[in-house]
Image (cartoon, rainbow, N blue to C red):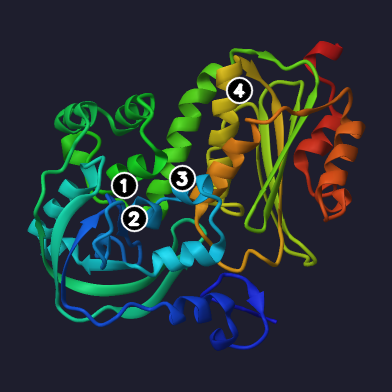
């Protein structure tokens, strides 16, 4: 077994044996130099060699009337798309990339496309035909085709929401406050992430392009911390509540416990020894969740949204089980949407911790002990009394 840099998992052989590589390669783009399309407001900003990075628009080659399902995880999850369907959609996109430091006009055009709430027609002139280059990460998903771009010409009027236009024009509005203000108006996370990544929010002197991987985490982190300020003032829930959900090889079990806020995520690859975990107590963590990475913040956002809506707080244990069918990393967005969806259902109620863990055991393939022995939150619950017990 070897670690594969393409699919970010272990499998036998080289990348030629990788299911993601073979699927994406079979869907590679046709040769083309110039095309016009309705571009969804989706971009990718790289992080390699920062700040001398590549960025660009993700645009379909074919003139799709609504290319949004090709780009955004909210659409993939809502339509219950399979991994194969998502990869097929992604294969229709070309990453029209350039180096922002040498291309001010291209950067400005990219920003104009990003602020549009609806797909905007644009002409793309490439330096050479798209080449197969699978860029994949647990944050950004899969980008299979890329090409250097010479020129992008917008051929229809971008439709910018009034509150977005106002926020962008306010160059004294701090990025975190601006972001939360826009979030409160029901704009999608993907839209907000692209705005943030395009360097359109914040105090003027501090505005700059932000790598997509960083902006994804930053948006989830900023919003969840804002919500958490209020959540920590609410009364704890009364019983143990268990929520669960499954999508394309990812099973989540959320255990909400009647206590003040604490939060832990444990992830395990089924039938392997691989386990990732990160934890925070009542006071927010100071360091990046470097083990679970972006999924930690996506999970926390979903929990905070739910507790904020209920006007309650809780101690939360998140268990994620990844099975072999998840052969391609589709990005943090699908994990955020899956996490949000579990709280639409009614929970299973338990009166104590052990019955709650037994319920979790029945929902997972992995033995619950594999999670329990690694959990700082459970160790804390078993060794410390809460304030109400004194």
Q: Nearer the viewer, residue 187 or 233?
A: 187
- Separation of disc 2 and disc 3 at Cα? 20 Å
On screen, 170 above or below 264? above
Disc number for residue 194: 1
Q: Residue at point 24% right, 75% down? A: 147
From the viewer's perspective, is the residue at label 4 or at label 3 nearer? 3
Asked if labels 1 and 2 touch by Cβ distance under 8 angstroms, the answer is no
- How many tags in the picture? 4
From the viewer's perspective, is the residue at label 3 or at label 1 nearer? 3
First-in-chain label (2 vs 1): 1
Asked if labels 3 and 4 touch by Cβ distance under 8 angstroms, the answer is no
Q: Residue 382: image x %, image y %?
A: 88, 32
Disc number for residue 307: 4
Label 1 CA crowd tier, 10 Å (few <14, some 14–19, many 20+): many
Q: Residue at point 61% right, 69% down? A: 327
Label 4 CA crowd tier, 10 Å (few <14, some 14–19, many 20+): many
Residue at mark 2? 211
- Separation of disc 1 and disc 4 at Cα? 26 Å
Q: Quadrant of the C terminus?
A: top right
């Amino acid at each position: 077994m070897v670690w594969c840099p393409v699919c970010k998992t272990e499998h036998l052989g080289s990348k030629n044996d990788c299911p993601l590589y073979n699927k994406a390669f079979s869907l590679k783009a046709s040769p083309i130099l110039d095309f016009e399309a309705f571009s969804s407001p989706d971009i990718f900003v790289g992080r390699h060699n920062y700040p001398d990075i590549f960025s660009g628009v993700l645009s379909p080659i074919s003139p799709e009337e609504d290319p949004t399902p090709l780009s955004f995880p909210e659409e993939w999850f809502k339509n219950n798309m399979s991994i194969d369907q998502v990869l097929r959609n992604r294969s229709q996109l070309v990453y029209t990339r350039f180096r922002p430091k040498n291309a001010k006009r291209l950067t400005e055009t990219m920003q104009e496309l990003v602020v549009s709430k609806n797909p905007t027609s644009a002409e793309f002139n490439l330096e050479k035909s798209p080449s197969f280059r699978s860029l994949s990460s647990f944050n950004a998903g899969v980008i299979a085709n890329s090409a250097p771009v010479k020129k992008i010409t917008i051929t229809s009027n971008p439709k910018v929401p009034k509150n977005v236009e106002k926020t962008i024009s306010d160059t004294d509005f701090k990025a975190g406050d601006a972001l939360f203000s826009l979030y409160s108006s029901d704009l999608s996370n993907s839209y907000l992430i692209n705005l943030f990544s395009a360097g359109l929010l914040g105090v003027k002197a501090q505005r700059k392009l932000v790598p997509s991987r960083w902006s994804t985490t930053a948006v989830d982190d900023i919003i969840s911390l804002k919500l958490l300020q209020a959540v920590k003032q609410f009364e704890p829930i009364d019983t143990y509540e268990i929520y669960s959900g499954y999508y394309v090889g990812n099973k989540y079990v959320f255990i909400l416990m009647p206590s003040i806020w604490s939060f832990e995520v444990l992830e395990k690859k089924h039938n392997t020894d691989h386990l990732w975990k990160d934890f925070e107590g009542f006071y927010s963590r100071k360091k990046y969740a470097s083990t679970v990475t972006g999924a930690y913040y996506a999970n926390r956002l979903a929990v905070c949204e739910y507790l904020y809506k209920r006007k309650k707080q809780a101690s939360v244990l998140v268990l994620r089980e990844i099975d072999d069918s998840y052969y391609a990393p589709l990005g943090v967005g699908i994990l955020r949407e899956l996490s949000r969806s579990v709280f639409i259902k009614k929970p299973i109620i338990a009166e104590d911790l052990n019955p709650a863990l037994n319920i979790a055991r029945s929902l997972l393939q992995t033995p619950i002990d594999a999670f329990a022995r690694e959990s700082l939150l459970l160790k804390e619950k078993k060794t410390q009394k809460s304030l109400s017990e004194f």
